[in-house]
Amino acid sequence: MTEVILIRPGATLYDEQHRIQGVLDIPLSDQGRRQVEDLAERLTERRLTALYYGPGDSVEQTAAILGPRLALKPRLIEELHNLDQGLWQGLCIDEIKRRHARVFRQWVEAPDTVCPPQGETIDQARERLKTALKPILKRHRDETFGLIVPEPLARIVACHLRQTGDIQLEETPPTATFETIAVDPQLCRNGWAS
């Protein structure tokens, strides 16, 4: 059975301030580095065969800490960059709720129907992920491998690996956490759900 360990990077100052990070390069905070050190301890039991990560300071720093601890050489996959949230990036979530209440509510309830100003849609991110994940899933059939991706991209990846439709953005999962996803063998053969 193929298992993907979906890993969220450690916290940044933006996470601690409840700001939208998107594709901005924000490094791990001191708290984030401590979180990743603790995460490495929990992941050592998983026996990963490979570790992939996307661009972005916090993700790259998470990979740099985890790789040696897991005896793996993390591999950068450019298409695993976070969802581009356009002009919302850098803003506090409460500020967006105040300024754009209706659109933000729609973003939380039905994110497929909203594109942040000058940002990227969920469907655009899915297409990018198809390109990135297809060869990885085929290469690692019947193995356990890790993907380090930030939110909200992690939820998009999780929905597709589980082959579920709706992406829920109500609550942001904690930073420096992981979840194990058993991947359907058909998905590994084809590389992606239709």
Image (cartoon, rainbow, N blue to C red):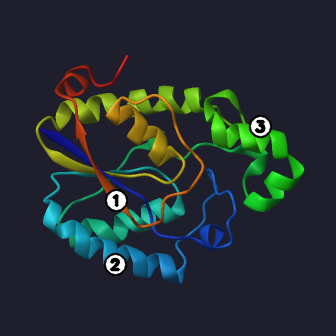
Residue 91 visible in rendering? no
Amino acid type at circle 2 is Glu
Relative to 88, does residue 130 appear above or below in the rendering? above
Count residues near mark 3 (Cα–Cα under 10 Å), then give few for <14, some for 14-19, many for 20+.
Answer: few
Amino acid type at circle 1 is Phe
**Which numbered mark, 2 or 1, is in the foreground of this view?**
1
Count residues near mark 1 (Cα–Cα under 10 Å), then give few for <14, some for 14-19, many for 20+.
Answer: many
Q: Earlier in the sequence, mark 1 or mark 3?
A: 3
Instruction: Name the residue tied to disc 1.
Output: 178
Q: Earlier in the sequence, mark 2 or mark 1?
A: 2
SS category of the residue bearing label 3: loop
Which residue sits at x=68%, y=45%? 85
Which residue sits at x=42%, y=59%? 8
Residue 82 spot, x, y in % from top left: 54, 47
**Mark 2 and 1 residues: CB-CB less than 8 Å, in contact?**
no
Q: CA distance from mark 2 to mark 1?
A: 13 Å
**Which numbered mark, 1 or 3, is in the foreground of this view?**
1
The quarter in which the C terminus is drawn is top left
**Mark 3 and 2 residues: CB-CB less than 8 Å, in contact?**
no
Query: Left or right: 156 with respect to 75?
Result: right
Instruction: Name the residue tied to disc 2.
Output: 37
Q: Quadrant of residue 44?
A: bottom left
Q: Earlier in the sequence, mark 3 or mark 2?
A: 2
Instruction: Name the residue tied to disc 3.
Output: 118
Q: CA distance from mark 3 to mark 2?
A: 35 Å
